[in-house]
Amino acid sequence: MPPGTLLPVAETEDQYDAIADDDDLIRPGVDALCAELGLDGEEVDRFDDGSLPVYAIGANRVLKLYPGVYAEEAGIESSVLDAIDGRLSIPTPVPEWVGEFEGWTYLLMSRLRGTSLARVWRRLPPDNRASVAENLGTALAELHAVNTPAVDELGPADWAEFIEDQRANCLERQLESGLAPAWAEQIPEFLDSVDLHTEATSALLHCEVMGEHLLVTPGDEGWELSGLFDFEPAMRGASEYDFASVGLFVTAGDSTALRTLLTAYGYGADRLTPETSRRLLAYALLHCSGTLPWYLRRLPAPAEPTLEAAAQAWWGLG
């Protein structure tokens, strides 16, 4: 860290990875920033998870820091949060201030209430899973329908080209993540067999809809959705790209909950098919931030070690 500075230099991914979890190194800068924002009297606590440093500031605010290498994501997140404010049936953070401090960008926003859905999903009874899934399907339909100038500016500029680029490096990326050759050799043929409808490019995508990014609170009839956050990876593209992460990290193999969610979103029975399941697995293989070894560790094993079986095990619709 250069003399006289309170936040470490993180202009490359390697520099950030070296300091990401060192709160003793980052916290002095956070305290100084809070003082500059007039929040020095508030209690400051870092959240345990998340790829970027995020702090609860008192009871009502959250401060998120973006190192230089990820500075662009602050603008994406703040503009998307502005665009969706009040448009969804579940709460989202409201931006209060975006600024720069010692080479980092920060976003001060309102704090949502609730418990991580990831912590309670497995113990929810079927009817409560169904109600959560239904409300999430409705909220995702609302999200995907948001269309403002800020959303129009989101990348990628050409969705079909983005998918082709992801496809070109898919096999190499999966192998680098430790995927066994028996799985890897299935990928090219599987992707060739799936029509991804790459002309559909208009939806505002969260890109990482997962239990860890959803909050729930107890209600009269069970747990209810109380928040959706973490929009810095947001893009504009095909809506089913979001359902890849939903199947992996929310419904997690519960086909009844997934059908309920997609029905609430607007899918008719003619779209709740094995072909849709295969398409969602294809998007998961091509996703920016996921790998098949991770999915295999996190989810129930398919009945057979094949991509066809994985599609039905994790996104079963037929």
Image (cartoon, helix red, strand yellow):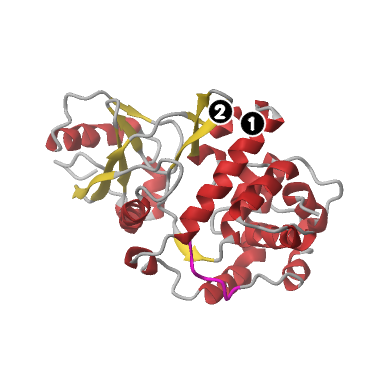
**Quadrant assignment for the C terminus:** bottom right
Q: Where is residue 146 in the image (x, y as percent from the top left)?
A: 42, 60
| 1 or 2: tag closer to the N-terminus | 1
Label 2 sits on what residue type? Answer: Trp
Q: 118 left or right of 257?
A: left
Dominant SS in magenta: loop
Q: What element carries label 1?
A: helix
First to last magenta residue range: 198-206
For disc 1, the neighbor class at 10 Å (few under 14, some 14 to 19, many from 20) is some
Residue 67 in view (yes/no): yes
Q: What element carries label 2?
A: strand
Q: At x 74% / y 73%, what residue is drawn?
A: 192
Which of 201 and 128 lies nearest the eye of the viewer? 128
60 to 256, vertically: above or below: above
218 to 300, vertically: above or below: above
Q: 22 left or right of 318?
A: left
Q: Name the residue under label 1.
A: 128
Q: At x 66% / y 26%, what residue is drawn?
A: 123
